Image: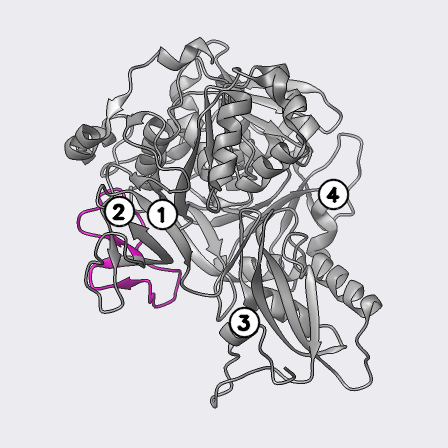
Amino acid sequence: MSDRSDATPRRSYSEARRDFDLNRAKSEFVGSFSDGVNACAECCDRYATGDRKALDWIALDGRHETRSFAQLKQDTARFANFLVEQGIRPGDVVAGLLPRTPDLVVTILGTLRAGAVYQPLFTAFGPKAIQDRLAMSGARLVVTDRANLGKLNDVASCPPVAVYAETDAQTDGTEVDLRRALAAQSDRFEPVLRHGDDLMFMMATSGTTGPAKGVPVPLSAMIAIRAYMVDGIDLRPDDVFWNIADPGWAYGLYYAVLGPLLLGHQTTLVEAGFTVDATFDVISRLGVSNFAGAPTAYRLIIASGAERAENLRGSLRCVSSAGEPLNPEVIRWFDDVLDVSIKDHYGQTETGMLVNNHHRLDHPVRPGSAGYEMPGYRVEVLAEDGSVAAPDEPGQLAVDIEKSPLLWFKGYLDQPSKSIEGGFYLTGDTVERDAQGCISFVGRSDDVITSSGYRIGPFDVESALIEHPAVTEAAVIGVPDKERTEVVKAVIVLAAGHEPGESLSAELQDYVKTRLSAHAYPRLIEFVSDLPKTPSGKIQRFLLRKGLTPDS
């Protein structure tokens, strides 16, 4: 095991929970959440002295480049000046459709520097998913690169577009050549101060009965994000940190970009997609000691065999997992083969991380559990009648709003929220809590599908399928899968004149990949003559999950 493990003493969990103080947590920031604060100043400017490193980047071709906080300060100033030139004002939404490159970090922080709101767009999204999210946010500008620009051609009412083009590339005149525009800007821009309740991110989360819902994230969320990096991740000055989650999603944006930079710590971005060999190479090459990812990646690592991982034994100090429950056998394998403790963490886009097996805090760890509520949050397990469930009895995980000073969620954008009720934020997840307070995930209370760490809304997939001329109706469910937790299954009623078969299944899968996103396509397709429905016409997905259709 790395000798870094004893560099900082662990804290007592019970003391950390008892002694949590919001004002003390706020004092870690240079700005004031009541009088004026700027996220870029907190993540960049305060550390922009000398050559202090902010970013390690591995490009597609294997190049390793770094950026200092001082460089980021200048680059984000140019970007903020560009936004002002485009008429972007504080509070306006700027969307980013970008891969994991330094340009992405500059776009995020430069937007925040100008007092604007950043909206992430996952690069695997197709035009429909992008269109829905841009319509939801009212974005004033989309920033992308050449590889993703074509997706915007089929987006109705698309906002103006700025493109990171190569230096010798020519634009067609319909979008802004961003590199050329940034080169002409000043590298000085005073960060725009905002209030803690003002927004910094506009996220989206999948639902079961409509398009993706907007999740406003205020500047005050930085307090909770920082707290997780300290107590959950246990990020230390001598760590080399790599969170492989894509910043197109909450865990990557909150904890691969913002979180480490809030501590003045280096973060790592790898442009290429995940492979076991590449992951081992980056860990070894950069000396990564603190690593975070999703169980899908860990299961692929295990499947590659212990012999391939042997060279990394003892090199990792902390490994964290989020996105879906972590299987106990994964925990045992990492302990036996890599000599490192991998710990499961639970959170949502709306809340950040809530329940963790904390790396820094001293408490028992039960394999297969999500852990204990993070200091600054108070959670309960509620029975169906709204009472607190008895120990080891299943119920819905709920956050006590009044007793959770780190909870930032106030409701979805322009929508009444059924998730806030009786003084609680209701997560929609079924859990159990033992007598010691340890929480274990049981399952989703709604129909949202969790696959490979992604939350997939059935409505989005169904909407994409119904656009195909061969499909009259579609219902989408999650089917248990050992590697991915769940896979997407589509149960389809065909239009007249179309016959079921493998070729049509493949065509529909490709259609969803292209139109919606690569991670959300149905890996399983069943053709039926009709779907089970209630008298009011609602699809009964619980019957489909049991394998029951009118044909059966």
In the picture, which quadrant includes the C terminus? bottom right
What residue range appears in magenta?
Answer: 397-424
Which secondary structure type mostly characterizes the magenta part of the structure? loop
* Amino acid type indicated by mark 3: Lys
Q: Position of residue 241 (x, y in %)?
A: 50, 23
Q: Nearer the viewer, residue 276 or 214?
A: 276
Return the residue at label 4.
Answer: 147
Is 113 located above or below residue 388 in the figure? above
Point out the tag, 1 or 2, that comes first from the N-terminus: 2
Quick check: marks 1 and 2 in contact, CB under 8 Å?
A: yes
C-alpha distance separating marks 1 and 2: 8 Å
The label nearer to you, 3 versus 4, is 3
The label nearer to you, 4 versus 1, is 1
Q: Secondary structure at mark 2?
A: loop
C-alpha distance separating marks 3 and 4: 41 Å
Q: Secondary structure at mark 4?
A: helix
Is 446 located above or below residue 536 in the figure? above
Q: Position of residue 278 (x, y in %)?
A: 68, 27
Q: Which mark is residue 440?
A: 1
Return the residue at label 3.
Answer: 546
The label nearer to you, 4 versus 2, is 2
The magenta stretch spans residue 58:
no
Q: Which mark is residue 368?
A: none
Quick check: marks 4 and 1 in contact, CB under 8 Å?
A: no
* Amino acid type indicated by mark 4: Ala
Quick check: marks 4 and 2 in contact, CB under 8 Å?
A: no
Quick check: marks 1 and 3 in contact, CB under 8 Å?
A: no
Point out the tag, 4 or 1, that comes first from the N-terminus: 4
C-alpha distance separating marks 1 and 3: 24 Å
Name the residue at 29% across, 27% down.
361
